[in-house]
Image (spheres, rainbow, N blue to C red):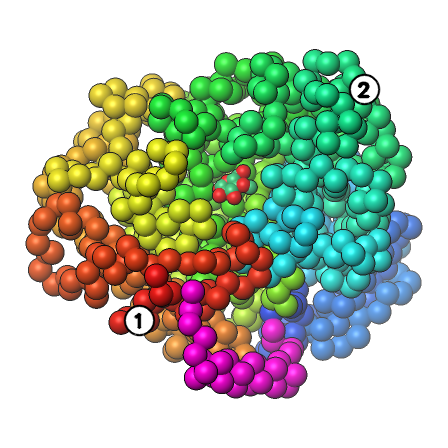
Amino acid sequence: MLSTTPVRLILRGILLVAAAAASSIASAEDGYDLWLRYRPLAPALRAQYATKPTAIFVERRSSRLAAAASELQRGLSGLLARPIPVSGLRDGAIVLTYTNCSPTGAYRLRSVRLHGHPVTLVSGCGDVGTLYGAFALLRLVQTARPIEHLDLSDAPKLSLRMLDHWDNLDGTVERGYAGASLWNWRELPKIDKRMIDYARANASIGINAVVLNNVNADARILTPLYLRKVAALADAWRPYGIRIFLSARFSAPIELGGLKTADPLDPSVRAWWRAKADEIYRVIPDFGGFLVKANSEGQPGPQTYHRTHADGANMLAAVLAPHGGTLLWRAFVYSGAATDDRAKQAYAEFAPLDGKFASNVIVQVKNGPIDFQPREPFHPLFGAMPHTRLAIEVQVTREYLGENAGIVWLGTMWSEALRSRTARPEPNSQVLDAISAMAGVANIGSDRDWSGSDFDQANWYAFGRLAWNPAADPARVAEDWTRMTWGNDPRVVKPIVAMMMTSREATVDAMTPLGLAHQMASDHHYGPGPWVSDQPAPLWNPTYYNRADAHGIGFDRTATGSNAVAQYASQIARCLADLRCVPDSELLWFHHVSWTYRLRSGETLWNALVDRYDSGVADIAGMNSTWSRLAPHVDPQRHAAVAGSLRRQLLEAEWWRDASIAYFQSLSKLPLPPGHSAPAHPLAWYEAVRFDTVPGFLAPGIGSCRTSVVTRGDPPCAP
Ligand code: GCW
C-alpha cells in the first residue's frame, strides 16, 4: 500500500483544493453532458440551418413523443443558438408522429409538405421509433450534416440492445472504474435528474434494455422492498424505451422462499418462481425478464441438482412467457478444477443443448471463448447453435484493458468479433448473422463523467451504435462520437478518430501481443503478471495461458494440443491450425512455438514479440504527443483530464512491456533485438509489485494505488 508520508498528505490536500476550485469555475466541461452536449455550432456551420428548423410539432399524444420533443427543443436550441419552440404546425417545423409498423424502433426522416407546410417529418414504427428518429435528426445537426431534402430511414438490426450493470446492492460495482453504483437504493423510489439523463443517453444510441444488478446476483433484488424501487426506475425510463431486466440468483427459492431446494424440476420451485414472476409483473407490467449466471465461478445453478442448463433456463422462461418476458442465460461457464482447456468448456456444455431451449430463451455468449481479453478469436458457439437464439456479450468496462486509463476505444474490437467469419451455416456467415441480441457490461458509475474518463464514454456510445447495427463502420461511429463530443473542427476530428481507431491494437501490443491472453495479475487483473503460477485453480494462472518455458511460448490448441480448433467449422479450423495460415495476431492463442520460430515476415518469434511490445508503447506515446498538439483546439478542462489519463496509460504500457519482457527473457535467455532497451528494473522488482485495493475488486471506490502507478524507479505500491 502506498505509504502516506506527510509530504504526500500535504500534496494530496493541495490537489484536492485545486480540483475543487477548478470544478467550481468550469464545471461546464466536466464530461457530464456526454455526447449530448448541444453547444452552439460554429457560425459558419450554423448558417445551413438558418431557415429550418423553426419549431417542433407533436402530432400524437405519447410520453415518448413528448420526450423526443423536449430533446429536440433542448438540443436544437443549444446547437443553433436560437429558441426552437414546441408549437403548432408551421413552415420549417419538425413534425413528430408514428404508426404501427415493424420493426419497432425503425424510423424515417423526410422533407415533405404537410397541409401545405414544408416540414421535416420524423415518423417511427411505434413511438419509440420516433424517439430514435429525433436523436438521429439531432445527430445530423450535431455533426453538421445537411437536413434539407431529407429521406433517410433506419431500423435496428437486433431487437434487444442491452446494458448489463454489474452493480451490487451495497453500491459497489464489480469491475467498475467510474465510482460507485449509479443506483441510489437508499433514495429510490425517488427519481433524481441523473436517472433521466442516463435514460436520454441510452435512448440516443438505441439501447432498449438495462440489467440493473450484477450477474453474481444477490437474491434480495427480488424482494418487494427492492421491486418497488425497480418499478420506479421502470416508470421513469419507459418514455425512453428502456425495459428493465434483473439478474436472478438461481437459489433464490431457498434464500427468499425458505424452500429446501432450487431444483428446476421440483414443482415447489417452479411454483415459487411463477408466483415471483407474477408479483414482478404486477408492479412492472413491461418487465423485460431475467439474466442468469449459473454454475459458473461459484454461482448456484441447475447442475447442482444434476439438471442441465436447458432445464434451468426453460423453467425460468416458462414463468416469464405468459407475460412476454425473456430469459437470458449466460454461457460463460468453466470449472476451475477441469483439466481440459478452458477455451473449450463453454462449447462442450452448450453445443449439445442446441435446440433444447424454449423460444423466449436467449443464450448469452461472450465474444471470445475465455474472458474479454484484449484479443480473442470469436467464440465457437456462434457457429454451433443454429437452433438457439444467441446474444453476444461484450465488456464495455475495461477490466482487462487498463481500466479507465487513456484511450482504448473498443468499437474496432467489437466490430472485429461481430464480423468474424464462422462459415456456418453458410460459407460466408459471420458472428453478426448468428445473434439476435447484444449485451454490453456497462462502464457507468456515479463519477461526474459517468464512465471514468472522457474517452470511456466513447465505448458506451460505440456499444449502442453497434448493437443497433452490428455491421456499422467503426470509423463512422468514432467520427460521429468525436464530432458530438469534441466539436466539428477538422483539426480535432481527424486526429481523435485516428487515435481511437488504432488505440485498441496499441493496447493489445503493449499487453498481450501475438495472441497471448490472460497475462494480468490475479484477481483484480490490474497490471502484468505473466509469471503467476500459484493460484489454487491451474487455469487462473497466467502461466497456464502463456505456456512459456526455455524452449518456447504459446498454447497449442491444434490436434497435437487441446484441439480447441475442432470447435470451429472445418475450413476455419484448418486455417487456424496451420502455421502458414493462422493470423499473427492469434498465433500464440493457437500454437506453441519455439523462441526462434520464424514468422512469415522472417522475424523470429522472440524478436517479433519484443518488437510488438515496443510498438504498442510507441503508439501510446504517439497518442500523448497528438493530444498535446490538440491543446489549442480543446477546452482546457477536458484537455487536462485526458492528458493526465494518457500519461497514466503510457506509464502503465511501459510497465506492461518491461515486466513481460523481463519475465519472458528470463526463460528465452535471448538478447534483445538491436534498438530495444532493457526493462527499467530486474524481473524481481516487477514480481514484487502488490496492490491491496483496485477499483472493481475487493474494495469499492478509488484504491490507494490507482493513481500512483509506475513512475520509473518507484514501485507502484510497496510490496
Ligand atoms: O471477467 C470475469 C470477471 C468477473 C465476472 C465474470 C463473469 C461478474 O473477472 O468479475 O463476474 O467474468 O462474466 O461472470
Which residue does the numbered mark 2 point to in the structure image? Answer: 271
Question: Quick check: 452 left or right of 424?
Answer: right
Name the N-terminal-most of marks 2 and 1.
Answer: 2
Q: CA distance from mark 2 to mark 1?
A: 60 Å
Label 1's element?
A: loop
Task: Check the picture and name the quadrant holding the C terminus.
Answer: bottom left
Q: Nearer the viewer, mark 2 or mark 1?
A: 1
What amino acid does circle 1 point to? Asp
Q: Residue at x 19, y 31 (%)?
A: 580
Q: Is residue 518 magenta?
A: no
Of the pair 230 and 387, the residue shown nearer to us:
230
Start-end of magenta stretch? 1-30
Please say if the residues under marks 2 and 1 sit with CB atoms less than 8 Å apart: no
**586 is higher (above) or lower (below) than 113:** above
Q: Quadrant of residue 388?
A: top right
| Image position, residue 25 (x, y; %) | 64, 86
Which residue does the numbered mark 1 point to in the structure image? Answer: 714
**206 is higher (above) or lower (below) than 287:** below
What amino acid does circle 2 point to? Ala
Label 2's element?
A: helix
- Badge 1: residue crowd in 10 Å (few <14, some 14–19, many ≥20): few
Q: Which mark, residue 196? A: none
Task: Check the picture and name the quadrant holding the N terminus.
Answer: bottom left
